[in-house]
Image (cartoon, grey):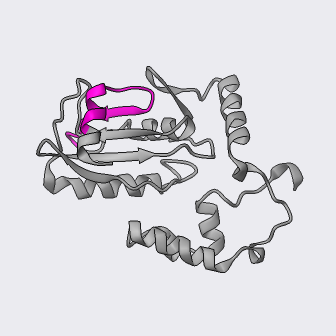
Amino acid sequence: MNPEKLNEIIQQGEGIDFEFKLVQQGVPENLHETICAFLNRNGGNIFLGVDNNKNIIGIEHTKIQNYINQIISSVNNPNKLSPTFYLSPETIEINGKQVIYIFIPESSQVLSTSGKIFDRNYDGDLNISNNNALISALYQKKQLTFTENKKYTYIKLSDLREDLFVRIRKMAANNRPNHPWLEMDDLELMKSASLYQKDFWHC
C-alpha cells in the first residue's frame, strides 16, 4: 500500500480494523493485545507513530529498525504470542515522517498473548479470557471459516511435497534473511505455522 493511500486511511480515524499507537519510550506494551485481537477477529492495520487524533508524529529514524526487530522477535516468542505468528512490519514515510505500518491478516487459529485472549470490536481490544461463550464463538468462527482447521489424521510428513518446503523457506528468506524457519526442520516449521497439531480427542 502506498503512502498516499495510507495517509487517506489515517485521516479516516481508528476503527474495528485500524489502530494508531504512539512510540515514545519504546514499543507500546499493549501492542500485542491489538495484534492478538486483530488476528482473532478479521485482521487489521496498525500504525505506530500516529496518535489517536490522527496526527502523524513519526518515529525517530535511528530507532525504527530496533523497534521492528523487537516486534518480529516478540510475535515469534510463544511466551508473548501463542501460537506464534509471522508478521512483516514496514517503514513508510508519510508527510516527511517515518511511521511503522503492520498489516495483520486474520488467523486461522485462536491466539492469546501472555495467557489472555483478546477480540476486536469498535471500542478497541476486548479481553474475553473469562467469557467462555465468547471464546467458544471465536473457535467456532475459525472452524467454519478456515479449511486448514480440519484434521487429516492419517497424513504423514512424508506424504507432503518437499519442494513446497523449499519454496516456503525461500519466501520467508525474501521477507527476512534471518527468518527462524530457515533453521527449522520440516516438522518444526509445520508446528511454527500451526499446521501440525495434536488431536487430543483421538489419542
Residue 1 spot, x, y in % from top left = 33, 48
**Magenta residue span:** 7-25
For residue 185, say whether it is visible: no
Residue 49 spot, x, y in % from top left = 22, 39
Residue 146 spot, x, y in % from top left = 68, 46
Residue sitting at 72 percent across and 41 percent down?
143
For residue 177, say whether it is visible: yes
Residue sitting at 51 percent across and 73 percent down?
169
Total numbered labels: 0
When asked about the image quadrant of residue 22, the answer is: top left
158 lies above or below 110: below
Q: Is residue 30 left or right of residue 58?
A: right
Pick the quarter of the image with the C terminus. bottom right
96 lies above or below 121: below
Q: Is residue 50 left or right of residue 125?
A: left
Residue 12 or residue 37, whichever sits in front: 12
- Name the outermost residue toward the left: 96
Residue 48 or residue 180, whichever sits in front: 48
Q: In the image, is residue 146 part of the stretch drawn in magenta?
A: no
